[in-house]
Image (cartoon, rainbow, N blue to C red):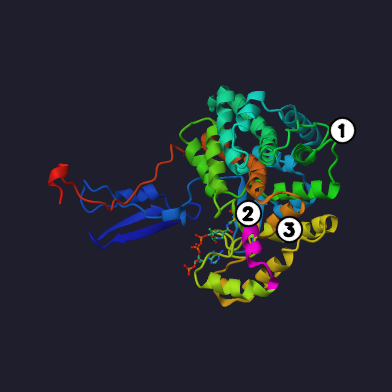
C-alpha cells in the first residue's frame, strides 16, 4: 500500500488523503483543501525554507545529524585524500569519476580557457584601488555575460558545456586579477604548464621570477580546500543560482547572483568574519569574556552553527588536519590558539551544546588562508572559485528537470486592506 497522510480539516470536517513520496508531501496537493469552492486553497508557510524541498537532486547528499557529506555518493573524506579539484569538479558535473583519458581531456580543455578577454581586464581596472575583491569578482562574472552572448542559448547542450568550461577555467583568473588590482600589482597571465591551483598561486603571487613555482604542500592544501568547497546542496548561493537561472537568464548573470549571495557574512563571507572576530578577541585570556558576550546576544560566534549540520561539519575536521600541514610550512598562525580555545569552551558550554552549534567549514579555513598569505577580503573569493563547479552543476540539473519552472514563492499578505487614494492636502 502506498504511504499516505490523512488530514482532517476541522473547519469543514472533510478528510484528505495525500500521497507521501520520498518522505515528502507535495505542497500543491494541499491546494484542494478549501472551505468554499472559490477559496485559494491551503498553502504552507515556510520562511527561509526550513522544511521545504525545492528540487530533487542527484549531486550532493548531507546527513546533518551524522556529519556525512557525499558528492555523487563518494564520501568527502575519500575525495579530499585521493582526488584533486578538477577531477572532483568533473565528478560533480558528469555524475561519475573520469577515466584517465577523460581526465586528461578535461584538464586540457580547462587549461585552454584560462585566459580572459583583454577588455575584461580593462573593465576590472576601472574599480577603485581599495575595492573589495569579492565585489570585483561578482561584477566581473556578471559582465562576462556580455562577452559571451552565446551563453544565452541555455537549452543547447553544447552551448552549456562550453559555458561550463569557460566559467570553471576563468574564475581563478578573475579572482587573481581582482587581487592584483586590489594591491596595485600588474596582472599575471595564466601559466598552463602548472596545475589548476599551482597556476592560481602563480597568478596571485608571481613577482619578477621567470617561472613561478609554488610550495607543493601549499598547492595541495589549496586543492583540498577547493575539493571541500565544490558543492553543498541547496545552500543560499546555490538556491540563488537555481532561482535566478530558472528565469532562463544566461549562466554568467545567474552566477553573479550566486556570488552575491556567497558574499554575505552569514554564508561565504563567514571565513572573513571569523578572522575579524579572532583579531577582535586578541588573546586567549579574553575568550571567556567574548563567549559571554555572544551568549548575551551581542553578536555570533562566527564559524559556528549550520542550518543543516547539527554535529561537527565533516569539512571542518579535514580542514583542521590541513591546517597542521600548512602551519608546518608557514609557521603557526598566532590566532590559532584563540580559535582552539573558543572551540574548546564552546563545545562544553550549555548554550552551544543545547543549540547543537559546532564549528563549520569556515571556522579554520580563514586561518589557513591567512597563513598562506591571502588577505582577509580574498577569503570569499577563494570560496567562489571551487563553488563555481557546484553552481553550474546545480544550474544544469535545474534546467533539465521537467518538474522545474520559474521560481516564484507565494506570500501571506499582511498589509492594509483596499483603500482609496487621499490627496496630499487632505491627509491628516
Ligand atoms: N553564535 C551564537 N549563537 C548562534 C550561532 C552562532 N554562530 N548560530 C546560531 N546561534 C543561535 C541563534 O541565536 C539561535 O538561538 P535562539 O534559539 O536562542 O534564538 C539558535 O542558535 C538557532 O540559530 P538560527 O539562526 O535559527 O540558525 P540558522 O539555521 O538560521 O542559522 C547560520 C545558521 C546562519 C549558519 C548561523 O548558525 C550563523 O549565523 N552562524 C555564524 C555564521 C557562519 O558561520 N556562517 C557560515 C555557515 S557555513 C557556510 O555558509 C559555508
Instruction: Tell me the quadrant of the picture where the N terminus can be found.
Output: bottom left
Residue at the image position 82 percent from the left and 55 percent from the top: 330
Mark 2 sits on what residue?
Answer: 272
Could you tell me residue 210's position as x and y percent? Answer: 87, 33
Could you tell me residue 269's position as x and y percent? Answer: 59, 51
Nearer the observer, 13 or 288 = 288
Question: Judging from the image, what secondary structure is the residue with disc 2 in?
Answer: helix
Residue lying farthest to the top in this orientation: 150
Q: Are marks 1 and 2 in contact (CB under 8 Å)?
A: no
Q: Quadrant of residue 325?
A: bottom right
Residue at the image position 53 percent from the left and 30 percent from the top: 250
Q: CA distance from mark 1 to mark 3?
A: 35 Å
Residue at the image position 84 percent from the left and 38 percent from the top: 212
Q: Are marks 3 and 2 in contact (CB under 8 Å)?
A: no
Mark 3 sits on what residue?
Answer: 318
Q: Give the magenta part as a residue range.
A: 275-284
Residue lying farthest to the left in this orientation: 426
Nearer the observer, 107 or 425 = 425
Q: For the stretch drawn in magenta, what is the main secondary structure? A: helix
Question: Judging from the image, what secondary structure is the residue with disc 1 in?
Answer: loop
Mark 1 sits on what residue?
Answer: 210
Residue at the image position 39 percent from the left and 50 percent from the top: 27
Q: Please, is residue 7 above or below residue 133 in the view?
A: below
Instruction: Decide: few, some or many residues near mark 3? Use Cα within 10 Å; few <14, some 14-19, many ≥20.
Output: some
Q: Quadrant of residue 312?
A: bottom right
Query: In the rendered image, is residue 249 in sight?
Result: yes
Q: Please, is residue 323 above or below residue 240 in the view?
A: below
Q: CA distance from mark 1 to mark 2?
A: 33 Å
Query: In the rendered image, is residue 421 in sight?
Result: no
Amino acid at each position: 500500500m502506498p504511504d499516505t497522510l490523512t488530514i482532517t480539516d476541522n473547519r469543514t470536517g472533510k478528510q484528505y488523503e495525500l500521497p507521501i513520496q520520498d518522505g515528502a508531501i507535495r505542497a500543491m496537493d494541499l491546494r484542494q483543501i478549501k472551505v468554499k469552492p472559490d477559496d485559494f486553497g491551503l498553502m504552507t508557510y515556510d520562511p527561509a525554507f526550513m522544511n521545504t524541498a525545492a528540487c530533487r537532486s542527484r549531486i550532493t547528499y548531507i546527513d546533518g545529524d551524522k556529519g556525512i557529506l557525499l558528492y555523487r555518493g563518494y564520501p568527502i573524506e575519500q575525495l579530499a585524500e585521493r582526488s584533486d579539484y578538477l577531477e572532483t569538479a568533473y565528478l560533480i558535473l558528469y555524475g561519475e569519476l573520469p577515466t584517465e583519458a577523460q581526465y586528461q581531456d578535461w584538464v586540457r580543455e580547462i587549461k585552454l580557457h584560462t585566459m580572459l578577454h583583454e577588455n575584461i581586464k580593462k573593465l576590472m581596472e576601472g574599480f577603485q584601488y581599495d575595492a573589495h575583491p569579492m565585489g570585483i569578482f561578482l561584477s566581473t562574472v556578471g559582465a562576462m555575460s556580455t562577452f559571451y552572448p552565446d551563453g544565452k542559448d541555455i537549452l543547447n547542450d553544447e552551448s552549456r558545456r562550453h559555458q561550463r568550461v569557460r566559467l570553471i577555467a576563468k574564475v581563478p583568473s578573475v579572482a587573481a586579477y581582482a587581487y592584483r588590482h586590489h594591491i596595485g600589482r600588474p596582472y599575471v597571465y595564466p601559466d598552463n604548464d602548472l596545475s589548476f591551483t599551482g597556476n592560481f598561486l602563480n597568478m596571485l603571487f608571481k613577482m619578477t621570477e621567470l617561472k613561478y613555482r609554488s610550495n607543493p604542500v601549499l598547492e595541495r592544501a589549496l586543492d583540498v580546500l577547493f575539493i571541500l568547497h565544490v558543492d553543498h546542496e541547496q545552500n543560499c548561493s546555490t538556491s540563488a543560482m537555481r532561482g535566478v537561472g530558472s528565469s532562463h537568464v544566461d549562466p554568467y548573470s545567474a552566477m553573479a547572483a550566486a556570488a552575491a549571495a556567497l558574499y554575505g557574512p552569514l554564508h561565504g563571507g563567514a571565513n572573513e568574519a571569523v578572522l575579524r572576530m579572532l583579531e577582535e578577541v586578541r588573546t586567549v585570556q579574553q575568550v571567556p569574556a567574548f563567549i559571554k558576550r555572544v551568549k548575551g546576544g551581542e553578536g555570533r560566534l562566527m564559524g559556528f552553527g549550520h542550518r543543516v549540520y547539527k554535529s561537527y561539519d565533516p569539512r571542518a575536521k579535514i580542514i583542521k588536519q590541513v591546517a597542521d600541514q600548512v602551519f608546518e610550512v608557514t609557521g603557526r598562525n598566532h590566532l590559532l590558539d584563540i580559535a582552539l580555545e573558543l572551540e574548546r569552551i564552546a563545545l562544553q558550554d550549555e548554550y552551544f551544546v543545547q543549540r547543537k552549534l559546532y564549528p563549520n567549514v569556515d571556522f579554520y579555513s580563514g586561518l589557513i588562508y591567512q597563513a598562506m598569505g591571502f588577505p582577509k577580503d580574498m577569503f570569499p573569493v577563494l570560496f567562489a572559485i571551487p563553488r563555481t563547479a557546484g553552481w553550474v552543476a546545480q544550474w544544469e540539473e535545474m534546467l533539465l528537470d521537467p518538474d522545474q519552472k520559474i521560481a516564484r514563492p507565494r506570500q501571506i499578505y499582511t498589509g492594509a486592506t483596499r483603500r482609496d487614494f487621499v490627496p496630499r492636502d487632505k491627509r491628516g
